[in-house]
Image (tube, helix red, strand yellow):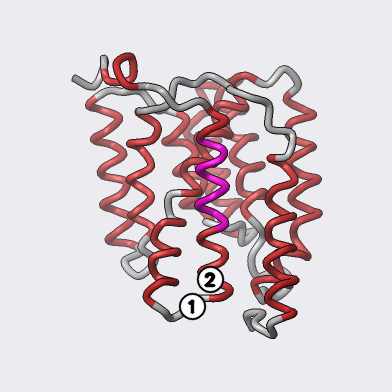
Amino acid sequence: MFSDFPARFATLTNYQIKLLAAGLMVIDHLGYVFLRETDLGLLCYSLGRLSFPLFAWLLVQGEAHTQNFQQYALRLLGMAILSQPIYQLTFGIDLGEDFNILFTLLLGLLCLRGARLWPGWAVLIWIGGAVVAELANFNYDAYGIAMIALVGQYKPTLLWWSTWSVFAALTALVLPDSMQFLAGGAALIFALANCERGPKARWFYWFYPAHIAIIGLVAAWMNRLPT
């Protein structure tokens, strides 16, 4: 049943998944800045839990198919550095308290490539990445690196689905108030992916700092910036 599911139903290109991931992130951030402590804000937050695993999926696809890994990594680093002050101002984050998601994705990218080059050291590479993410206060911390590792192993098999389900269940137990277990639903989108690139998305790297900046400017105009 699991092995023939993608062949029968896979229709989503990576470009379409990018659009979905970007849209869910915008919904999440709008809810956090403008609708906190409301039922609508809770709905936005819940939908937003699907965004990170989709970005993890795109990262895995990018690492596997990039023709210039160094350029890919440097682009992520540049955007992470550019985005950080915007991220802090928009979400009311103190310096060093939380580094934006692009730093997490960059670390995940390095772990993906390291595990590919040195498979015998893969477990230690991922554990090291999780420790770095936790100590450096990267967004999603060790959880984010663990999710990237698991997404990187995606196969439409009973074993993978069982492992993913256990991961979601453990998330619900360890982080019961975060609702992060809802991210488990993103696996249904993985199953619909055909791994084709689709149209080029040159705007995608700029999307992250741009949408946060726009939300921050509107919030400042409305005197609604988080503190």
Amino acid on which the number 2 mark rests in the picture: Tyr
Predominant SS along the magenta part: helix
Quarter of the figure with the N terminus: top left
Residue drawn at 41 percent across, 71 percent down: 40
Is the residue 28 above or below the residue 216 in the image?
above
Residue drawn at 41 percent across, 79 percent down: 38
Between residue 98 and residue 195, name the one nearer to us. Answer: 195
Q: CA distance from mark 2 to mark 1?
A: 5 Å
Q: Which mark is residue 182?
A: none
Residue drawn at 51 percent across, 35 percent down: 17
Total marks shown come to 2
Q: Which residue is mark 1?
A: 36
Residue drawn at 49 percent across, 41 percent down: 54
Q: Which residue is mark 2?
A: 32
Q: Position of residue 153 (x, y in %)?
A: 42, 27
Q: Secondary structure at mark 2?
A: helix
Q: Which residues are drawn in magenta?
A: 17-26
Between residue 79 and residue 222, name the one nearer to us. Answer: 222
Asked whether the beta carbons under mark 2 and mark 1 sit within 8 Å of each other, the answer is: yes
Q: Residues within 10 Å of mark 1 (few under 14, many from 20)?
A: some
